[in-house]
Image (cartoon, rainbow, N blue to C red):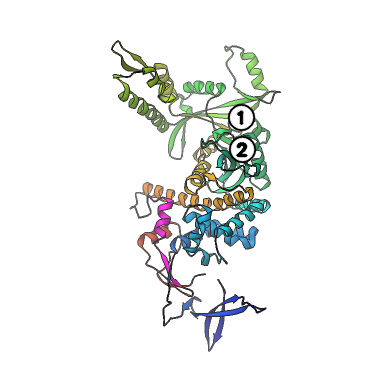
Amino acid sequence: MGSIFYMERNGQKYAYESTSVRVPGRKNPKTIKIYLGKVDPETGKIIPKETRNAPKEEYAKFYGSVKFLDGVQKELGIFDDLDSVFTTMAPNIMGAAMALTINPTSFDSLHYTVEGSVIKETMRLRGTSSPSTIGDLSEKVGSMMVTMDRFFSKRIERTSSGFFSLDLTSISSYSDMEGWSHFGHNRDGENMKQTNIAMVTDGNGIPVMFHMLPGSIADISIMRSTIEDMRNLGCQGRMIMDRGFESARNVSALLDLDVDFTMPSNVKSEPIKKLMTKAIKELNLSSSFAYHNGSAYKYAEYEVGIIDSDDGTSEYIVHVPQNHKDSAKNNELFSGSKKLKAFVVYDPRKASDDINSVMSMVNDVELKLENTKHDDPAMTYAKLPSFVRRFLDYEVDENGTMHMIRKQNAFTFADNRAGMFVMLSSMDTTWEQMMTSYDVRDWVEKAFDVYKNDLDGKRNGTGNVERARGRFFIKFIALMMRIHIQNVLREHDRNTLSTRAEKDSVNGMTVDELLLSLNTVFAIGNTGNWRLTAISKNVREIFSTFGLEPPQSGQIILG
């Protein structure tokens, strides 16, 4: 795309496009000027020239989705931040990320989206977007780790959120990635080598930073290094962490780092189970009732201690009544331990869902197996999911007929625990802070879901670690836009329900459906002579929902 310049004659301003072209055998490049049209003295816009003879060949390029994503990235300040640190590489990074957002596919196929849309004209890209070009771009970006950190720092500066979520996922790899891929606990259940990705999102779920780490590194090492890096990049605030980090050793490290944190507990530790049992009685008190975001809850809060042993292990400990065995020794250890806070919460809506979940599976099995005959009833029972066997046993009568028996203790336990969950937090955490953290606890998991399911991110297909890191960075930029779009769509649906307003064509849309609708707007034409196809009501409503100016059909200037 050439540069646009203006000339004035007889009081009228005219616009031209200037492009430099190298000519074989000549030392200096040749300048080609193309007349674009007159400049409107009132609006300053270029009035395209009228062509007497239409071009012999016209092209149709996707326009609506590119125009929309350009508006989204401007609102988020993505290109401005890219431009400030990556300078001349910024348009190419932004262009590749926009193509990936529109059509989540392999990097080798991105050029089809770039060439088939107005991304090239919008981002003023030069040259081709061939697979080799995209590969070279990814590798160069992946080698610029300091520059990426500067970009992350700028993203952190932009967020006003007081909450940040940290989680870890694994990306399966076909190669050892120069020593970065290893066999380990694969979170996707694949028997492949993996690389770990630690990602941080803000309180709105927008990714602000990530680190690519070798697949053999333990969660506690990732947690320590990521939190230290976050602090170095200017990230201050409460950490919302996944229950995978809730081991006593990890929490002990968080307390040593003096980090404000909140995380759900999987209630596998015996001291945490004791708190849930203790809370069942205390949740009957009137003081246990609380209100948050229009919903009622009951809760009790307790102090929990952590004891670090000389062998490097850690364990939870809670205060016990004096009539308990070894209470004096236990409570002395508790008194000198590191302290955190545990919230035991009862959610009536969750209670109903929990019981429904149990009864749905139990009922299905009872209907399937009750009064049936099998060659091997024991094997039939053993093949049931462990969750179902927890609630059902069986017997076989004298006729060889199988009968299902409900386990009374299991149902009583499930009924007592239904709707209850435990959140672990730093000592200064209030009820409201904890519940706000609970509301946003799954943002980073949703971000990973979008990355793996929407952005072709399940497996890594390159053996070059720098290229892999660069590819993830480009996907990271695409992820920021897709999560923002997802948030606005969700909020739009929520507002429609709460205000009982009439639904529009945007309600119920997914991100992919929205982008497909926008792809109905094409730019048709050739160099210097483009026009837009008709703009549908649906497209206008999409732009309006996001607070963006919708495009107008007719003649346009690209670039």
Instruction: Give the percent coordinates (x, y) of residue 183.
Output: 59, 35
| Pick the front one: 439 or 466 | 466
The N terminus appears in which quarter of the rendering? bottom right
State which region is magenta.
501-525
| Residue under the point 40% across and 24% down | 384
Residue 264 spot, x, y in % from top left: 53, 33
Magenta span contains residue 205: no
Rendered view: 323 above or below 488: above
Dot 2 crowding, Cα within 10 Å, few <14, some 14–19, many 20+: many
Which residue is identified by label 2?
Answer: 182
Q: Determine the residue positioned at 35% across, 29% down.
A: 360
Q: What element carries label 1?
A: strand
Describe the element under mark 2 as helix, strand or loop. Answer: loop
**In this image, 405 relative to 16: left or right?**
left
x and y, in percent, of residue 355 in the image: 39, 27
Q: Position of residue 416 (x, y in %)?
A: 43, 22
Is 230 in front, or is 199?
A: 199
Can see residue 445?
yes
Return the residue at label 1.
340
Asked whether disc 1 touches disc 2, contact meaning CB atoms under 8 Å apart, the reply is no
Judged by depth in the image, the label closer to the viewer, 1 or 2, is 2
When the figure is inspected, residue 307 is found, relative to residue 193, above or below; the finding is above
Disc with the residue nearer the chain's start (1 vs 2): 2
